[in-house]
């Protein structure tokens, strides 16, 4: 389960609209909006460098924050979107949603693959294929898990796979996909072995074709003797 809720410091932004947002960016801030709950939306700014640090740290959009804005009560929020510059891929705007501790929300939670050294299928030469490195779950805002743990030691043979039904999810969390038992990861044969098997099959086909002509007699010029094709 997640530990203590981290703080997210922001400043109230005076003015709204594109003009105020551009002015904030010129001052090294990223404009955003806090919405939801029973109060009006609150325009805010976060220093560009601070937001970049949090984005690079990962899980920004799946982390519950304690938003602190001078002159306002602290409130739990979660990021619903970060708009980026289409050329520079830098944040230009963000949306935060107010949450109650008991609010149910959909979040993509990262998968933590453990016990790779104890996975028999891998020690036999198999290759781990990660089908999903994160899974969308319905979780309670006050109990967002840090990750979903997948134990690879259960994979014994090449070809084995782990489905969502094989994973113990955090208490109160359920997958958004309920109509099928989807695969999270599997172990396949290494590509070199698969290529060797293909070569063996091709070689066998060539031998078979050659053998089909072993008993055909030819004349001095290499053509089938008379009567061979009758």
Image (cartoon, rainbow, N blue to C red):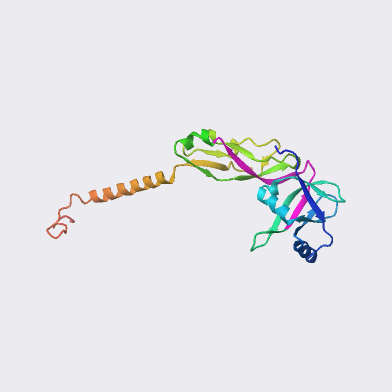
Instruction: Answer left or right for 181 relative to 45.
Output: left
Quadrant of the image for the N terminus? top right
Residue 159 % position (x, y) = 47, 39
Instruction: Answer left or right for 22 relative to 133.
Output: right
Nearer to me, 228 or 210: 210
User: Is 156 drawn above or below residue 189 in the view shown?
Assistant: above
Q: Is residue 156 visible?
A: no
Instruction: Answer left or right for 158 relative to 102.
Output: left
In which quarter of the view is residue 144 placed? top right
What residue do we see at 70% from left, 55% from top?
82
What residue do we see at 54% from left, 42% from top?
185
Does residue 89 show up magenta in the picture? Answer: no
Q: Is residue 51 visible?
A: yes
Nearer to me, 183 or 99: 99
Nearer to me, 134 or 22: 22
Q: Residue furthest left?
A: 220
Provide the residue span drawn in magenta.
93-115
Nearer to me, 141 or 118: 118
User: Is 49 drawn above or below residue 188 in the view shown?
Assistant: below
Q: Residue furthest right?
A: 71
Residue 208 % position (x, y) = 27, 48
Instruction: Answer left or right for 220 relative to 31.
Output: left
Examine the residues drawn in magenta and state their main secondary structure.
strand
Quadrant of the image for the C terminus? bottom left
Residue 215 % position (x, y) = 18, 49
Does residue 112 show up magenta in the picture? Answer: yes
User: Is 178 drawn above or below residue 23 in the view shown?
Assistant: above
Q: Residue furthest bottom?
A: 19
What residue do we see at 35% from left, 48% from top?
199
């Amino acid at each position: 389960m997640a530990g203590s809720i981290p703080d997210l410091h922001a400043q109230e932004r005076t003015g709204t609209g594109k003009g105020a947002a551009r002015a904030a960016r010129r001052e090294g801030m990223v404009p955003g909006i806090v919405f939801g709950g029973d109060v009006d939306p609150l325009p805010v700014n976060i220093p560009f460098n601070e937001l970049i640090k949090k984005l690079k740290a990962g899980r920004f959009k799946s982390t519950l924050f304690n938003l602190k804005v001078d002159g306002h009560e602290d409130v739990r929020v979660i990021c619903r979107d970060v708009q980026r510059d289409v050329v520079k891929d830098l944040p230009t705007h963000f949306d935060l949603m107010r949450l109650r501790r008991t609010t149910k929300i959909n979040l993509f939670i990262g998968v933590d693959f453990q016990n790779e050294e104890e996975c028999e299928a891998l020690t036999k030469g198999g290759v781990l294929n990660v089908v999903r490195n994160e899974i969308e779950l319905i979780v309670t805002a006050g109990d967002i898990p840090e990750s979903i743990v997948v134990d690879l030691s259960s994979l014994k043979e090449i070809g084995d796979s782990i489905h969502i039904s094989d994973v113990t999810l955090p208490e109160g969390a359920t997958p958004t996909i309920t109509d099928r038992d989807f695969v999270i990861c599997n172990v396949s044969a290494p590509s070199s072995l698969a290529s060797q098997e293909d070569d063996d099959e091709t070689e066998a086909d060539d031998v078979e074709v050659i053998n089909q002509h072993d008993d055909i007699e030819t004349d001095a010029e290499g053509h089938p003797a008379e009567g061979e094709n009758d």
